[in-house]
Image: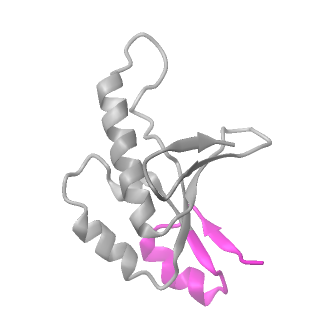
Amino acid sequence: MQFGWRCCSLDQAEAAKAAGFDFIECTVRSLTPEVDEFAPIQAAYAASPLPVKAFNVFLPGDLKITGPAVDWPAVETYVDEALRRVHPIGAHGCLRQRRGATSLQVLSFRRSGRSCSVS
């Protein structure tokens, strides 16, 4: 069994390792899908003292996915880029939990593409 530090940022990875954790779980937002240049972000994750095995907080709060003012092209662009960035980091999926919920939904994807499934 492995133990991970949830909602950790890369600057906390060394402390997580010192505390005995096996991996960290960062936010998708930390991958900054809205920024064009990914190489420096990927390099920072590659230098982490602990691997990132999952991501959480898939959507930013200001990106609306319900209601009359949804900008679907912006949602699609964000989701495509976010999924494109999660895989090279080495994570196996993105966790989603609603506040007060008693269960988790796991957004997982196949290594061959950007397919996403919810379980």
Horizontal and vertical percent for residue 56?
A: 55, 53
Please identify the quadrant where the C terminus is shown.
top right
Please determine whether, in this image, residue 20 is positioned above or below residue 9. Answer: below
Identify the residue at the far left of this view.
Answer: 37
At x 53%, y 54%, the residue is 110
Horizontal and vertical percent for residue 84?
A: 37, 53
Please provide the residue range marked out in magenta. Answer: 1-24
Horizontal and vertical percent for residue 80?
A: 36, 43
At x 65%, y 81%, the residue is 21
Please determine whether, in this image, residue 72 is positioned above or below residue 26. Answer: above
Seen in the image, is 67 located left or right of residue 1?
Answer: left
Residue 19 located within the stretch drawn in magenta: yes
Horizontal and vertical percent for residue 82?
A: 38, 49
Quadrant housing residue 69: top left
Seen in the image, is 56 located left or right of residue 119?
Answer: left
Identify the residue at the far top of this view.
Answer: 68
Q: How many tags in the picture?
A: 0
Residue 22 located within the stretch drawn in magenta: yes
Colour mode of the rendering: one colour
At x 19%, y 59%, the residue is 37
- The foreground one among 80 and 112 is 112
At x 77%, y 43%, the residue is 103
Identify the residue at the far front of this view.
Answer: 112
Please identify the quadrant where the N terminus is shown.
bottom right
